[in-house]
Image (cartoon, rainbow, N blue to C red):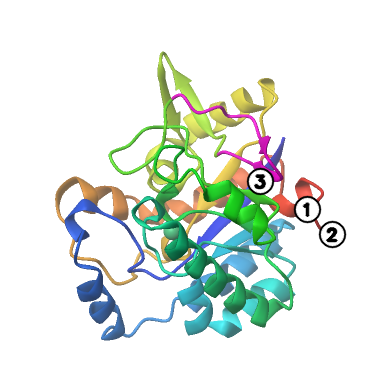
Amino acid sequence: MNGLLTIDVEDWQHANFQQLDGREEEMRSLAAGTEYAMDRNTDRWIELSAAAGVQSTCFVLGEFAEKYPGAVRRLHDAGHEIASHSYRHDLIYRMTREGFVEQLKRSTGALGDLTGEQPLGFRAPSWSVDDARTPWFCEELASHGFSYDSSEFPVKTNLYGSSTAVLEPRYVGELLRIPVTAVYPLGRLRVPFLSGAFFRLVPRRLIRLGLRRMVSRGLRPMAILHPRELDPGHPRLPLKGWEGYVHYARLGSTIPKLESILGEGTWGPIAREFGFRG
Ligand SMILES: [Zn+2]
């Protein structure tokens, strides 16, 4: 098994939920007034990856790179791929084409200043792209020097995704699109098992079965984590009900499960695994 290991590098308040819709500035002030060093978790990521002898793709948010430049340099120096997660954590399908390009340039500038390299990969905040609302998305990424995108989530939720999306990587123009492949087929349903809350909630037995199922289908599993998930004690957003549950459920299971899947096979960063760079 040869998997793709990825982490979306952002702060604890970077999330898109219905309850927080229209409260972006309030959450920004909440975070600004809360003392918490998220870079301790990116350092923990470096340690965990090194212990397993693997490297990852880090989709870094521009705002995170500006707040924690040393953390991004340390990830880069440790051999992790630095890719873009946009500049702010805004939903792309609510942006104009021009607004998206402006954030893309700010993100690329912030990352390039730290690594000296053009990021090759992109992942949309909350998988917020689709053919209907962002038909210009792939064209803009390619024309701004990106080689691949990893923004397709093959399960429909109330915020994002499509349950009929293909799982195989494919070219759209010059851009390679690499969907989140890690879904377990359950009848007509697809159950994600290696990303965020799904990874925390799905039992280990099902994760192991899912990994085997993917290999037998000739697909490469893609794991998706966040720095905040490595510390169950990180500050909380004012989320209630189901949204609060999924955002914070079983945080303590992240590291043991991560260590377990890293022992199941080999894992690597997307650019290297697809032959884009070193
Ligand atoms: Zn994100």
Task: Report, in whole angstroms, how far the alpha carbon at label 2 lies from the one at label 1.
Answer: 6 Å
Q: Image point 71% across, 45% down: which residue?
A: 174
Categorize mark 3 by other alpha carbons within 10 Å: few (<14), some (14-19), many (20+).
many
Categorize mark 2 by other alpha carbons within 10 Å: few (<14), some (14-19), many (20+).
few
Amino acid on which the number 3 mark rests in the picture: Leu
Front one among 106 and 27: 106
Please tell me the numbered disc located at residue 4: 3
> Is residue 251 left or right of 254 when viewed as pictured?
left
Q: Image point 57% across, 38% down: which residue?
A: 179
Please tell me the numbered disc located at residue 278: 2
Task: Report, in whole angstroms, how far the alpha carbon at label 2 lies from the one at label 3.
Answer: 15 Å
N-term mark: 2 or 1: 1
User: Where is mark 1, residue-wise?
Assistant: 272
Amino acid on which the number 2 mark rests in the picture: Gly
Q: In which quarter of the image is residue 215?
A: top right
Q: Is residue 177 magenta?
A: yes
Total numbered labels placed on residues in the image: 3
Pointer 2 and pointer 1: residues touching (CB < 8 Å)? yes
Q: Could you tell me if residue 21 is visible in this image?
A: yes
Amino acid on which the number 1 mark rests in the picture: Arg
- x and y percent of residue 51 in the render? 69, 62
Q: Which region of the structure is painted magenta?
A: 164-179
Please tell me the numbered disc located at residue 112: none
Q: Is residue 274 magenta?
A: no
Q: Could you tell me if residue 61 is visible in this image?
A: no
